[in-house]
Amino acid sequence: MAEPFGRSGNAARCRARRRGPGPDRQGAPAGSAQPAGRLFAAAAPFALAATAAYAAFGLVSMLGDWRLSGNPDFLVPLSFVMIGCDLVTLAGAVLALGGRFAAGARCAFAGTLAQEFALLVVPLAAGVLPPTAAAPYLLAPVAVAALPLACPPDLRPPGRSLGAAARIALLLWTGLAVAALTLADTGSHLAYVLWRLGVPMAAALLLAGRPALARLRTPGRFALAGAPFVAMGYCAGAVDRDTVVPALAVVAAAGVALRLWRLRGGTSTG
């Protein structure tokens, strides 16, 4: 019984020191043990959904206005750059929600950054300085698209287990859905809010699925998950300066209500 504390026990401890600390002493991977890491992980799929919805909004708006104008020269060279960036962003966000999180999130961020960079460079090239009021419209999409990149690798959303053929089908379905929304667009205010922004948001949330909703266990996570939709709604014009603060307040209040409801449910079941 005393042998583990003798020479054999000392030798075992020396070997352990040479090998370094075991898995139980290494602690959690970097980022996942921090509250901020778990916060970004919970909000990541919703930021991707908001990014996908805003890219789809841009595509439907651009192509819908072109169709409704009846002018074949309605689109300018910058319009084709915008369409290309929106396609890259939308494809990346859909792939990230479909299971290829790392590659899809980087693709969505690259498309968003390229688009906002083009919107900044074009007026500067013409000698026009963008007004300061344009800053939120340029920075908000980039910040939302960058949020999933802050998710710790070991806490990335699992997404849907889709094979290569299923992912290709998902991308094709996304393109067909954008085309259908473009054809159904009428240019009215209802179509502006519903078809161009509302339907893409609902579809993106459906793609994120219930596992993403299950991670929203605290008011902070709920608020950070809802903020990207408010930001993209502001950039799309569905939310203005008079309603953006109340919208954020509603999101925060909903997070607190959800937390209280879950605590009450846990108490009643316990």
Image: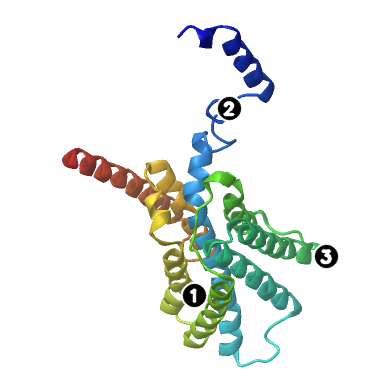
The mark lying in front, picked from 2 and 3, is 2
Residue in the picture at 66% in, 69% down? 88
Q: Where in the figure is residue 92, as x and y percent of width and height? A: 61, 65
Which sits in the foreground, 117 or 136?
117
- Quadrant placement of the N terminus: top left
Q: Is residue 173 left or right of residue 255?
A: right
Residue in the picture at 59% in, 55% down? 140
Secondary structure category for the residue under label 2: loop
Residue ID for mark 2: 22
In the current view of this chain or complex, which residue is farthest to the left? 268
Residue ID for mark 1: 196
Question: Residue 125 shows which numbered tag?
Answer: 3
- Quadrant placement of the C terminus: top left
Mark 2 or mark 1, which has the lower sequence index?
A: 2
Q: Is residue 134 left or right of residue 226?
A: right
Query: Disc 2 versus disc 1: distance between alpha carbons?
Result: 53 Å
Mark 3 or mark 1, which has the lower sequence index?
A: 3
The image quadrant that residue 104 belongs to is bottom right
The mark lying in front, picked from 3 and 1, is 1
Secondary structure category for the residue under label 1: helix
Q: Amino acid at mark 3?
A: Ala
Q: Amino acid at mark 1?
A: Arg
Which sits in the foreground, 243 or 62?
62
